[in-house]
Amino acid sequence: MARLGVFTSLAAYQGRWLRGDLVAGLTVWAVLVPESLAYATIAGVPPVVGLYAAVPALVLYAMLGSSKHLVVATMSGTAALSASVVADVARQGTADYVAMTTALAIVVGVLGVVAGLCRLGFLSSFISEPVLKGFIVGLALTIIIGQVPALLGVDKPAGSFFEKLWGILGELGEVDPTTAAVGIVALVVILALKRWAPRVPASLVVVLLGIAAVALLDLDDHGVEIVGSITAGLPDVGLPDVGLSDYLDLVGPAVGVLLIGFAEGLGAAKTYAAKEGYDIDTNRELVGMGAANLGSGLVSGMVVNGSLSKTAVNGSAGARTQASSITVAVLTLLTLLFLTGLFEQLPEAVLAAVVIAAVIELVDIASLRRLYQVWTGPLGRIYKHAARVDFIAATGAMLGVLVFDTLPGLFIGITLSLLTLLYRSSRPHVAELVRADAGLWVDRERHAGAGADPRIAVVRVESGLYFANADYVRDRVRALAHDPVRAVVIDAETTPTVDVTGAAMLVTLRTDLERSGVRLLLAQGIGQVRDVLRKSQEQSGLPPAYASVDEAVAAARAVLDGAASGEPG
């Protein structure tokens, strides 16, 4: 079971961090409140449900999570997933719909806590860093394009990234000039303050200016959309009014919701952990995310997850620890009690500008370009297009998110990553070696001038030897055993594992080569390889093994010289 620490980000807290955490908390609060209202609407529940979810989610993740910067609250992706799941079991606008939305959060929470305690965080290893990078870029672009309609005052189109983009282009003739002016000015001010006055909480400044502008200039009377009415007060605490069978029906869909929420939160957490130089514990992330959802469900909230946009706001505003999230939770609680009227006057265009400015730095095209450049001539000759395995996986995840939405995009990236890995594993590089001046055996392609005995081919299989690549390795070695080669030495130093199929292949290869008058020898097999070969049922037919390549070559040369002089081999 996983070990849990409590509020680990606050350990050894330094007083000089307090200002940054408080400012970041204020800034995230200014973004979280209107976003939570909007995302609750996406989920098909009353707007205030988004605020109900935020308070326990922020506190419980800060208590149990491992990231110092991740903000856990409602998000558009999981809100949309929640709507699609609950729509299959209840009709929107009814009390049952709200209850099932809350029940979904509880099921997701239980699954997350159980998965974390059972140390299933290792499953995140199957989501590689390039896949996460592509996923984050695609998700950031999706968030940005989703905010553009509010920024310009046009209708928000539905569909994928490209469908939304095409819809927005078609709406450009309907742009509301006042709304667009407010949104664009807000975006420019935020970016300018970040560029030339990074210590100023740009997002908070712009939010307050937007609220003041509405109050002083009556912008809402000139076509500028504002957040509108928010119900005040605290929620009921307890389980929703649903049966056990309803909970069980939600388990399958909840796994998908947990996976996408965990992937998005993990991507955001790792992004900022890498910037600040600390590590993320995936098991604690699962527990923290699960506890956040469980807490949300118990106070009539909805599904929550690590928020990419709000984490970006948090990090850029100067947060150092989860004290910023606790600040946001306190402010959100106060908002529910006393301050709902303040955010009713916030222009939606200003909110969109804050989100876009926070997320735009995560559209890291330069990283994708660097992944594409990880390629060399030898790699290309060995693995063909699969030589760019990381770029393929990252691009696949990004395009999957942009074309098919978040969950399919993540699965596409993971699938491409595994397929290219399997392809490369099934076709390992079989290098022909020559002895360099320093006595090392090196790849002939990289040391063309090194000398070698033309009668003896020394080869190296740069992979484990198992069922998926045994035939390919056999064919490559046989191809290298051409005239005048009369002996082949396989350097097994870079072959870390072998299975029974690989051992049987070596027996078959020895027989095939001996029919052509070519001897087969093994050298430098590591311990577990020697163990498997020793235990193999084909042991009697295996090639002779030597402690080093030099010993194997010397033995082969002695046999060949003896055969040339007529002596017994």
Image (cartoon, grey):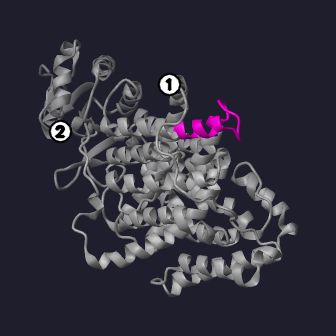
Q: Amino acid at mark 2?
A: Val
Residue assigned mark 2: 549
Q: Nearer the viewer, residue 237 or 2?
A: 237
Q: Amino acid at mark 1?
A: Leu
The answer to whether residue 490 of the structure is visible from this angle is: yes
Residue 344: % across, % down: 66, 68
The answer to whether residue 75 of the structure is visible from this angle is: no
Q: Tag 2's secondary structure?
A: helix
Residue assigned mark 1: 244
Q: Earlier in the sequence, mark 1 or mark 2?
A: 1
Q: Nearer the viewer, residue 532 or 58?
A: 58
Magenta-tinted stretch: 85-104
Number of disc labels: 2
> Is residue 90 rendered magenta in the image?
yes
Q: Residue at x 43, y 76 (%)?
A: 23
Q: Residue at x 35, y 70 (%)?
A: 320
Label 1–label 2 contact, CB within 8 A: no
